[in-house]
């Protein structure tokens, strides 16, 4: 029997032995914890399979038997081998169990809670996550946490990170950029941390940090990393908030960056590198600010901050031009730019800040560049990062 299936079967039996779920609410199975007034998400086993699927927005509070319970945890293996493809975890969650999303091979997007201290063992092993932002306060990425995430291309690591355990990013063959906000290199010297990973652009806070990483075991191998100081060019969100269901509105974000979501009081309510963020719908206007960030500063200056409201009134977003944004794609070592580009300046840099291309654009622009690198393409006011 496949080793992962054995592990998953063990998790199912362990959950059953512990009493499994106490109640269901909103499509999730919950178990009450030993702490009064708290609940955790557990497996939802139907016909021997984990029945979670699609977009899963975990609620921060659930109602059961006359009481409200704060959702503070996700049990070990809770979503393992399920058919979820997007998960949003509320900030009430402070504990995520080992193997919580093991082998969710359809899972591409995850928004982590802001108050966890570590990413547990094999938490996302074998998933299809493409980009992940790990929040401040996390000090450890556990054993095999992102192993075999073959589509993972961009990782944002916090300044609080101290230790990356063995095999944490092993076999992430498409990983090509890591933003690490820690000025002191986290310990990453265990077995196979970067096994199967190579030609990664590692972006660190400044030149002093770059020197520290260049002289740090686990980060200094030039076949694995090309190390650069942080660059300030950022990508804007690509759309305004749209209805998702009766409880949520959804904002499509730009790719290749993390995004801070800030409420009206100025409080950070979410950090995500997913393709979408979800804002609670309300019967009156509530303003949120979405700030692209590399996690090494406060994001973009005021003119590029994009505000969204979640009320029922039609949204008016003056931050975006009425004309369509350009389409920028890469294929076979070539960047293609399609748009009404008349008289707009087109520039291309690599991650070290080297300018490769800088001239007035034309429609259906074609640019040949060295392969296996991340580039920053700017046309007019539109900026996009792209890998070729």
Image (spheres, rainbow, N blue to C red):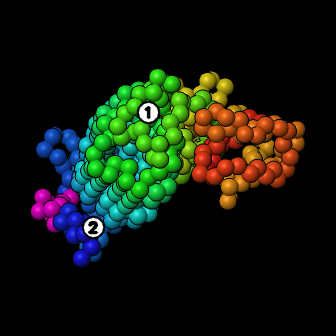
Q: Position of residue 105 (x, y in %)?
A: 41, 64
- Is residue 313 magenta-colored? no
Residue 19 part of the magenta segment? yes
Between residue 71 and residue 101, name the one nearer to us: 101
Going from N to C along the chain, the mark reached first, 1 or 2, is: 2
- Seen in the picture, residue 339 relative to 257 is either above or below; the reply is below
Residue receiving disc 1: 214
Of labels 1 and 2, the one closer to you: 1
Quarter holding the N terminus is bottom left
Q: Identify the residue shown where x is 39% and y is 43%.
A: 112
Please report contact status of discs 1 and 2: CB closer than 8 Å, yes or no: no
Q: Which mark is residue 4?
A: 2
Would residue 313 be visible to someone looking at this image?
A: no
Instruction: Write the residue at 44% across / 33% down.
Output: 214
245 on left or right of 306: left
Residue at horizontal 68 percent and vertical 55 percent from the top: 333
**Looking at the rendering, which quadrant does residue 209 occupy?**
top left
Q: Secondary structure at mark 2?
A: helix
Which is nearer the eye, 291 or 384? 384
SS at mark 1 in the image: helix
Please give left or right for residue 273 compared with residue 113 in the image: right
Query: Is residue 112 or residue 51 the one in the foreground?
Result: 112
Q: Residue at x 71, y 54 (%)?
A: 334
**Residue 290 position in % (x across, y down):** 55, 34
Please name whichever residue, 119 or 268, is drawn nearer the observer in this view of the structure: 119
What span is colored magenta in the figure? 13-21
Tell me if residue 9 can be seen.
yes
Q: Where residue 90 is drawn, which disc sits there? A: none
Characterize the local packing of mark 1: few (<14), some (14-19) or many (20 or more) Cα atoms within 10 angstroms: some
């Amino acid at each position: 029997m496949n080793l992962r299936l054995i592990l998953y079967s063990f998790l199912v039996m362990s959950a059953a032995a512990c009493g499994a779920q106490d109640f269901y609410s909103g499509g999730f199975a919950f178990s009450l914890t030993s702490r009064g007034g708290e609940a955790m998400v557990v497996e939802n086993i139907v016909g021997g399979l984990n029945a979670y699927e699609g977009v899963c927005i975990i609620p921060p509070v659930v109602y059961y038997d006359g009481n409200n319970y704060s959702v503070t945890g996700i049990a070990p293996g809770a979503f393992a081998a399920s058919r979820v493809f997007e998960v949003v975890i509320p900030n009430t969650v402070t504990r995520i169990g080992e193997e919580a999303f093991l082998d969710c091979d359809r899972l591409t997007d995850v928004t982590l809670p802001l108050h966890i201290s570590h990413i547990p063992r094999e938490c996302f092993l074998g998933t299809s996550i493409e980009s992940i932002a790990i929040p401040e306060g996390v000090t450890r990425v556990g054993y095999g946490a992102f192993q075999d995430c073959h589509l993972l291309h961009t990782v944002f690591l916090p300044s609080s990170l101290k230790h990356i355990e063995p095999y944490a990013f092993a076999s992430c063959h498409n990983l090509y950029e890591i933003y690490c906000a820690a000025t002191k290199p986290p310990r990453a010297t265990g077995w196979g941390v970067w096994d199967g990973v190579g030609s990664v652009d590692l972006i660190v806070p400044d030149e002093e940090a770059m020197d520290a990483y260049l002289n740090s075991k686990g980060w200094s191998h030039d076949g694995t990393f090309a190390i650069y100081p942080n660059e300030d060019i950022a990508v804007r969100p690509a759309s305004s908030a749209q209805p998702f269901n009766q409880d949520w509105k959804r904002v499509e974000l730009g790719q290749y960056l993390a995004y801070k979501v800030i409420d009206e009081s100025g409080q950070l309510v979410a950090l995500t590198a997913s393709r979408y963020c979800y804002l609670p719908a309300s019967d009156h206007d509530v303003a949120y600010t979405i700030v692209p960030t590399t996690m090494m500063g406060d994001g973009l200056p005021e003119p590029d901050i994009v505000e969204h409201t979640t009320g029922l009134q039609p949204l008016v977003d003056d931050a975006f031009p009425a004309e369509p944004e350009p389409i920028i794609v890469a294929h076979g070592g070539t960047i293609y730019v399609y748009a009404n580009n008349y008289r707009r300046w087109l520039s291309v840099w690599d991650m070290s800040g080297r300018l490769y291309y800088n001239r007035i654009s034309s429609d259906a622009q074609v640019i040949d560049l060295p392969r296996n690198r991340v580039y920053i393409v700017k046309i007019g006011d539109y900026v996009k990062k792209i890998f070729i």
